[in-house]
Amino acid sequence: MKTRRFRPEEVLFSATTLCNLRCAHCDIKQRQSTLPKKTALRFLGRCAKAGIKRVGFTGGEPFLALDFLCAITKETVRHGMLFSRIMTNAGWFQTKKELLSALNCLFRAGYDGDFCVSVDAFHRQNLRKVACFVKAVTEIWKRPDIVSIASVKGAKEAQTRRRLIALAQLLNARCSGYPNQHVAMKNNDLFVKIFSIELSAVSKAARLKNAWNEKWFRDDFCKNPGNVFFVLPDGTVKPCCGYATDADILTIGSIKRDTPQKLLRNALKNRFVAAIFESGFHPIRKHLERHGLRFPGKTTNHCFFCYYLTHYLPQPLLEEYLDDVSPRRRSPCLPAGR
């Protein structure tokens, strides 16, 4: 049986916080600074030597840092690493010429991963631009399934459904299966999977949904958003890309000074990070309840629960738990190098 612990499998770069949209549920503060290419390239090489094999991009809007995107792509190919996906809103360009120029730059750099486009009631980009993006990507890479869609669920779902249907019509495709979990847009030349992401009612999104309900989440030990080196524009590294990544307690270092091995050691020394990856959130919850803390309700969203712990819980209470139940320390575990 595999021991549960933080096991970084991917480097996820957020090179910029800049974005062409202002979404009602997003609280990312936009700044002009961009992750330095030289620093990122050096870290990428170290990750390749450490055996980490996947690279992905998010934001902000990654295409607003195109030079960074193409430079990291070339180096990823040179190291024989794999790509996961680029998260984009697909509405960042002004003209079709600009779109094709950017996509061809990325194609020539060697990118062969996927593109995941955010489409829902919150991302109010021009759907004609999204359709143009999907068609261009599919044509350049000659892959009918290279694009997927991520849609926020849990609020304004009727509006989201209307936008998805409208996009399908612009693509001369049909939207099948909605609102079930496994859905897609498809025609003879296109197959776009649609994935749902649960809205976490944090910060600006708190007014959109009550995250507290009658059922507790099933702990996944941060398997889905975690086990990555999530690199922010200032070089700070987090062990996951969930909603609570702005919390200092989730910082495990910086690529400006730390190697992948040092980051992993930092993660194992960080008692909160070690606890949630090894034991999950429920031991923390039960400990706090035994000591008299009453939560406003239950929640099915463990990312929201992490945000609540790191933003609303008095830190002495959390430290008390970590003092009482600190996981055993184990040897750092990076993938086997090539």
Image (cartoon, helix red, strand yellow):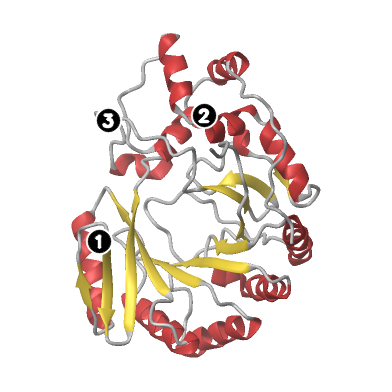
- Residue placed at 60% from the left, 41% from the top? 6
Work out which residue is located at the far front of the displayed protein and give it.
Answer: 1
Q: Dot 1, crowdedness within 10 Å: few (<14), some or many (≥20)?
A: some
Residue, disc 1: 160
In the displayed structure, 121 sits above or below 90; it is: above
Which numbered mark, 2 or 1, is in the foreground of this view? 2
Residue 279 circle label: 2
Secondary structure under the numbered disc 2 in the rendered image: loop
Question: Which amino acid type corresponds to the residue marked 1 in the rendered image?
Answer: Thr
Q: CA distance from mark 1 to mark 3?
A: 25 Å
Per the image, label 3 sits on a secondary structure element best described as loop
- Is residue 264 in view? yes
**In the displayed structure image, the side of residue 156 where residue 193 appears, left or right:** right
Looking at the rendering, in which quadrant would you find the C terminus?
Answer: bottom right
Q: Quadrant of residue 302?
A: top left
Given this view, does label 1 or label 3 mark the residue nearer the observer? 3
Give the CA separation, mark 2 to mark 1.
Answer: 36 Å
Q: Which residue is mark 3?
A: 215
